[in-house]
Image (spheres, rainbow, N blue to C red):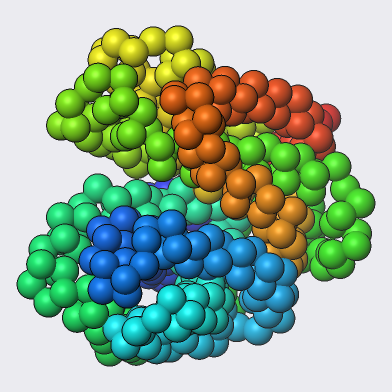
Amino acid sequence: MTSVHDSGQSQLTPRVYAGWSMVGLAFGLGFLTNAFYAYSRGIWLPPLARDLEADRFQVSLAFSLVSVVSALSAPWIGGLLDRLPVRRILIVAALWLGLGYLLLSQVTSLLMLYLVMGTFLGLAFVALADAGPAKLVVNWFRSRRGLALSIISMGASTAGVLMPPVIAALIEAVGWRGQFIVFGAILLLLVLPVVAYFVRNDPAEAGVEPEPAPAGDDDGEDDRVWSRRDALRTSDFWGIVVVFGIMLATFGATSTHLFAHMTDIGHAPGRAAVVLSFMAAAALLAKPMFGYMIDHYDPRLSVALAVGCQGIALGLLLLTHAFLPLICAALLFGLGYGGMVPLRNAITALSFGRSSFGTVSGTLRPFQLPLMVTSIPFAGWVFDRFGNYDLAFGLFCALQLGSGIAILLLVRATQRSARLRGISGSG
């Protein structure tokens, strides 16, 4: 029997090899799906709008539609992830997304664009880019779950650092329609067979022992089955909704409008781009740090640090226009939002366990949707109305710091973390 000490800290056992192979696959899914959408949509938006004879606002509505469909379908998809093998869900999602990109290459009107992006991208992204890979890692890891979740979330950040120039060159070479054909081909001819052949739902399916519990006793909570009604009755559920809903909204609005803010206040586009690069680099480096912290310390500490970094960064954006303080703001903001996704998933797994992770994480999304879909246009409205982003940054700063109170609602996560780390009491 593998001891806790030998659970992979120093020996490459079959279980350790298989578990980190699943992390690598999940990282790859996050990298590709975000490269094809989150970090390329701003590049293919202008030529697509021009060819469809539409304005950019009309095309941007398709992005909002993807977010709405993803959030509303997340409870259903999350439930499927808890009931069915993750591999099966990922296979269907890869097939669905690949077909969606092939159909996008053929759109000739805004209506077709909305139908394809809502029906295919909106449904597939929940399973393939976020909930599916996270559920796979939660199934495989217990003592190093936070670290594993942070590593797979680095796939999206890595795509943001590396892929925009590649996507721009691809569009230059084959056009936006050809780009979508390439995306679809990669998903159908590469991602689909890799997922079908290599993904294993959990250690039992791979024929290896599960990862031992952390330093404390296994409390059995990982296998507890939660109904949506029971989850809604916990303070942890609403703490996650408030804290991470505000973090997601703040990230969406700030990352979308920061470049424009920098140029509006007199900085050259090149300097503004440098600030964005610092922010992305800080986010990438922050992920494993937060993953390690939540595995080894009180989870409230990690969440408070991420919230505080974003709040202070927004305060700096509001108070100063000087370049070096703005670099500091970008580093702090990147540090905060770098921990956002791995912390949300790790806190959800701590509070509600492995068996109900998909159900609960999917149920969270519709409650966070209003903040997510209104924050970006709200910041745009503030600029149109007042000629600057001061009101938006000030409100987001207040919301961010105020959400720190909701950290106190994370009772189950705090108590369970303490038990699993072998600490008596709630920690």
Which of the image's four quarters has the C terminus?
A: top right
Residue placed at 16% from the left, 60% from the top? 168
Query: Could you tell whether 69 is left or right of 103 in the image?
Result: right
On screen, 3 above or below 121?
above
Answer with left or right where residue 105 lies relative to residue 271: right
Front in this rendered view, residue 359 or 314: 314
Image location of residue 67, percent across then percent down: 56, 62
Residue in front for this viewpoint, 373 or 159: 373
Snapshot quadrant of residue 239: top right
Q: Can residue 90 be seen in this view?
A: no
Q: Residue at horizontal 85%, vertical 57%?
A: 231
Closest to the observer, 286 or 413: 286
Is any atom of residue 426 visible in this view? Answer: yes
Q: Residue 148's spot in the image, x, y percent? A: 47, 53
Q: Would you place residue 393 above or below residue 34 in this image?
A: above
x and y percentages locating residue 371 in the rendered image: 65, 45
What is the x, y in percent for residue 13?
A: 40, 65
Res. 232 image quadrant: bottom right
Q: Residue at x 44, y 25 (%)?
A: 387
In the rendered view, does 290 fall on the left or right side of 247?
left
Q: How many labels does the image show?
A: 0
> Which residue is farthest left?
173
In the picture, measured across the screen, residue 148 lies left or right of residue 75, that is: left
Which residue: 31% across, 34% down?
259
Q: For the N terminus, which image quadrant?
A: bottom right
